[in-house]
Image: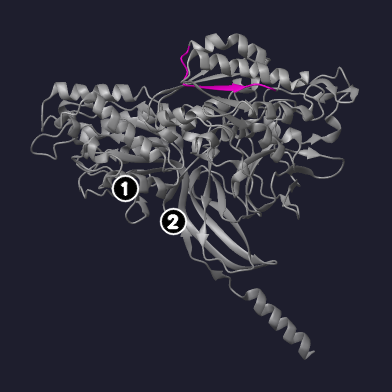
Amino acid sequence: MLRIILCIVLLGCVALHAAEPVKIQSPIPNQVSQRVDFDPQRKSENPGGHADIYVSFERPPGATWEYRTVLLDNAVGTATDWTRFNNHVRIDAGGWYRLEFRGKTGDAITHTGSVEPIGVGEVFVVAGQSYATNCNDEKLKPADPRVVAFDSVKNSWAISNDPQPVVDKSDGGSIWPPLGDALAKELSVPIGFANVAVGATSSDQWMPGRSLHSQLIRTGQQLNGFRAVLWQQGESDVIAKTTTEKYVENVRAIRSAASRKWVNAPTWLLAKSTLHPTVYTDAAGEGRIRKGIDELAKLSGFKMGPDTDTLAGENRGDKNSRRHFSAVGQQRAASLWFETIKAHLAQPPSLLDRLGEMSLIEPAWASQVVRRESSILLKSGDGPATARLAFPAAELIEVSTADRQHAFHDVKLSADGLTIEFPNTGPIQPIATTELFPPKDSPNSYKHRLGHPEQNLLYRPGRWFHDRNVEITYRRRDLPKDKLDVHGSIPKTLAKLKAGKPITIGVSGDSISTGLDASGTTKTFPHQPGYPDLVAAQLGVQFDSPIKLVNRSVGGWSVANGVADLDKLLDEKPDLVIVAYGMNDVGRKDPDWFFKQTKTILDRIRTANPEIEVIIVSPMLGNKEWVHTPWEMFAKYRDELRKLTGEGIALADVTAVWERMLANKHDLDLTGNGLNHPNDFGHRLYAQAILVLFKS
């Protein structure tokens, strides 16, 4: 009896033992994280979008960690139940939330922690001079507690009461609290401002290498993602008599150098801010800077902001005030900014806004972390739906639908790290293996299966495969050893790009090069274009060169069509030509013919202009079961292209990329139509293979 009582007492002690608290280092109270994958055209009861937030705290070994989100009073968003996590937690747009954590050993909760309030919404970096700081007449406070400001020096967030936390120590009022109120009301999400503006600064003082630019970069990196830069600057350039050309050159350089250091290349919204009536009257000088803003707004990465120069008279303080915006002027400037940002957010995020998340300069085959690799969900018999990985995974970081709207948490990674089982497939309808080879003449199929003329192949162009794709971000358990062999070089193009000179890129190709079946062409979120646009956008950011893309590709074309169309492409005066054929040629089973046709294109380009350089692209692998894409031909066609390379002619070996990626995957995992077009991830692979040639 004594033993029984003692056991009961001991068990009771275990059950009543309090969980130990953990101290959360990240996220921090009042933090707003920038939402991603927000589609303004998608109707939803919730604000839309989400953030994958990095979590940092000291974790005792051996525990399994879970998180949940709890909506605080009057909050908008999505509360979640307990979900396992590693280093990142996904939180839907909204707030305020309380984010709770618990560590478990078996069924026992051993550790707990929480942080509040936090939110997911819209974050903006404010840069410029005094009208953007605290040099205005009235100190303001937001009415909505979800409007917060980031102090980049203290690395903290707080309610966005004036004076804003800025490095110039100005202590008056600003225009940002009423703007935050208007945005929070319109968007139903928290709003964050990170203000690095400094009074009396010219564009020269913001140039790369100077302290203001370094502070701008650091702040953007601390935020790890934000929507846009709000640029309110110009008065000091009027005083300095900066020319229009110099102003454009300066602001372009400021943006370009910062964008290369940030996760994405966010849009810069440019206010026309040249009027300073208590300091000068200089219509000509104001006109020069206003014209510079007009010219910048035409360039990629910039958009027109509000014209705060229209706020004259009672909107400005007199010589007895702070000599910037008056109290009424502050409210009206905020209203002008609100209308600009509202219009900006009504459009889907631009390609530049999303470049960073595509990891185009981090090739999937050569990276320790593979980002957003695609797989179709296949189901065999009564077994679970499965996805396949190209490389063995040590850790799954994110698993989501290709439209970025649904995340999977209850998945199981196989022992070898190459297969993921889905007990619950959420919004995705898996493809049964019995559906892959329908009888001939079946709808949604194409004839015919290699060696089986009585069978067709599943064929669904458009968004059908996209709607059945998952994308997986994972950390590899092996060390990346795969390198794409580089054949040939493009030194003249590289020299022009490094000098910031404008480049015209011409593309001659088939339907793959038109971008067919990328989500941008099927009008499906995330609206990613095909690989030529990805390459042009990335080069523009990487080198700050104006890139003009001339794409004369046509679906169904053979390399022979490229020969016939070449003169029209050369009329566009390209500096670089991308020649991408083969998918519609391998069925001829004539590598020598393909070599001669491609060589004809190259010879005629050199004859027309020896300064033009060329990237030839070997094609992805078509479906191995399709009679029109014999797999043994792809390597032979690629090998013929290698013979043509040299200085001024380089090969992007997409064939080798597909050979490596499909070693552990199914053909359908990378396809957009089931046969011979890449999906979004496939177009990113194309872009990565081409961009490798620019790394030197």
> Which residue position holds label 2?
28
Magenta stretch, residue numbers: 572-582
Quarter residue 451 falls in: top right
Count of marks overlaid on the render: 2
Q: Nearer the viewer, residue 542 or 464?
A: 542
- The foreground one among 185 and 49 is 49
Report if the CB atoms under discs 2 and 1 are less than 8 Å apart.
Answer: no
Does residue 482 appear in this view? yes
> Is residue 339 rendered magenta in the image?
no
Q: Is residue 605 above or below residue 221?
A: above
Answer with left or right where residue 332 lies relative to residue 666.
left
Residue 152 in the image: above or below residue 103: above
| Amino acid found under the numbered disc labelled 1 | Gln
Image point 73% across, 38% down: which residue? 662
Task: Write the residue at 80% across / 45% down.
Answer: 384
Q: Position of residue 179 (x, y in %)?
A: 33, 36
Chain-order first, disc 2 or disc 1? 2
Amino acid type of disc 2?
A: Ile
Q: Residue at x 15, y 21 (%)?
A: 284
